[in-house]
Amino acid sequence: MKRLIQNIKNIWKVEELRKRILFTLALILVYRVGSFIILPGVDYAALERAQAAGGQNTLETLLSLFSGGGFSNASIMALGIMPYISASIIMQLLGMAVPAVQKMQSEGESGRKRINNYTRILTIIICALQAPGYLALYVQSKGAMPVDASTFWWAQTIIVLVAGAMFAVWLGERITDNGIGNGISLLITVGILSRLPGAFTAEFGFAWEAGNLIKIVLEIVAFMVVVLATVLIVQGVRKIPLNTAKRVVGNRAVDDQGARNYLPIKVNASGVMPIIFAQAIMTIPVMMFAGGEGGFLQRTLGDVYGISYNVLLAVLIIVFTYFYTAIMINPRKIADDLKKSGGFIPGIKPGEETAEYIDSLVSRITFPGSLFLALIAVIPAIAKLAGVNDAFAMFFGGTSLLIMVGVVLDTLQQIESYLLNRHMDGLMEGTRIRGRRTQGELSGF
């Protein structure tokens, strides 16, 4: 505990890190305030009455979870970050099929900027399609629409929703550039964490009043086990041993073969993105369509604890895990870089055989990782069947837990890198959690 307190003090000794943390907290505060600014003309009292009467289904609760309550509050940021995530998915899919997008991806920084601009334009289009569906399927169904809702009101409200979503994207990008990084993911995590105290109160307060202390203990233990398992899978790494050529230092040839060099392949190389992608894909149809199609989608995908919803979610997570891993890890490029640097995997010929070996290894590692992600994603439905409260079941596993664990670990690593650059102990010094690259781990892969 003493070391932890000292490490926290060290954070404020690094001026750059201190400024970045304060800047990040300020933008997060702006985002949280925006989630409570109600759309002009919306009857918020009617929304409260509908929610008190149990008028919010599980899908609406999930969407509100990702927007930090902005969805259920009918705020100017009701659409949240999810349209931007959906646009990013589409652009990455186009990068695998459209030569023009592939060319931009290979142009380096200039190409990345162009892709980001196209992603923002696509985000505006998705927001413009989702906003009318949100107003019709949620605000109007709760009886919160203005009595004299004219065409002008619809047009201005759609513009406000689009502007709110783009402002949230801008906040996330500023956190990434000038804050502690992971801006978009961090905003999603903050929205999720804002709902956690209420979920704990709703679950354990009821159990405490009923005198069911055994249930409280069992749920806490199960929750901790799930969190530990999630951390394990997020931090899991398969180390591929490497032999490196002799390097010349001055006039001497230094043999590095005695060093512990290895190529790290993460079990979950895709991070939190597969489950965010899958969730975004499943919310697009429900948010976009109203009327008959919307009713059908509400019946099939509206129940996040239903069999059809969870089966489709698990399949999408497995698919996106492989898809995003293929984007993150290029075996052929890794093999070429090793060959150019004089490194090789013992027993494997450099070049094509090395690429095939890495590809087969990544495929074998990704399979159990994707199954674990899918299992975590459907745990809330299992918890619901076991009698856990709806609000707390969302945190018992699933998207919220994976995002929280992944983003918190990434944020800790960002902070730790600043501390280590100043020759200070990291936040995770002395623990078994991998917070930084070890001496033998090769960077750049």
Image (tube, rainbow, N blue to C red):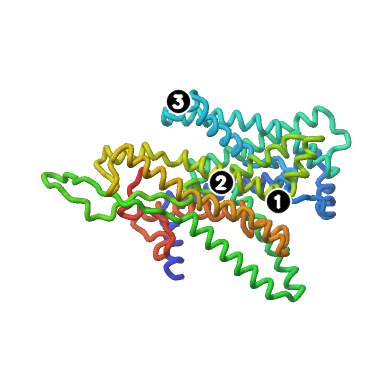
Relative image position of residue 416 (x, y in whole percent):
42, 55
Query: Residue at the left extreme?
Result: 251
117 relative to 256, above or below:
above
User: Mark 2 vs mark 3: which is more N-terminal?
Assistant: 3
Relative image position of residue 244 (x, y in whole percent):
24, 47
Q: Secondary structure at mark 2?
A: helix
Q: Which residue is mark 1?
A: 307
Q: Is residue 246 left or right of residue 282?
A: left
Q: Which residue is mark 3?
A: 103
Determine the CA span between mark 2 and mark 1. 17 Å
What residue is at 55 percent from the left and 54 percent from the top?
A: 372
Relative image position of residue 426 (x, y in whole percent):
40, 59
* Quadrant of image for the C terminus: top left
Determine the CA span between mark 3 and mark 1. 41 Å
Marks 2 and 3 in Cβ contact (< 8 Å): no
User: Mark 3 vs mark 1: which is more N-terminal?
Assistant: 3
Q: Is residue 278 left or right of residue 240?
A: right
Which mark is on residue 318?
Answer: 2
The residue lying toward the viewer, choosing from 423 and 223, is 223
| Kind of residue at badge 3 | Lys
The residue lying toward the viewer, choosing from 154 and 238, is 238
21 relative to 334, above or below:
below
What residue is at 54 percent from the left and 48 percent from the top?
A: 272
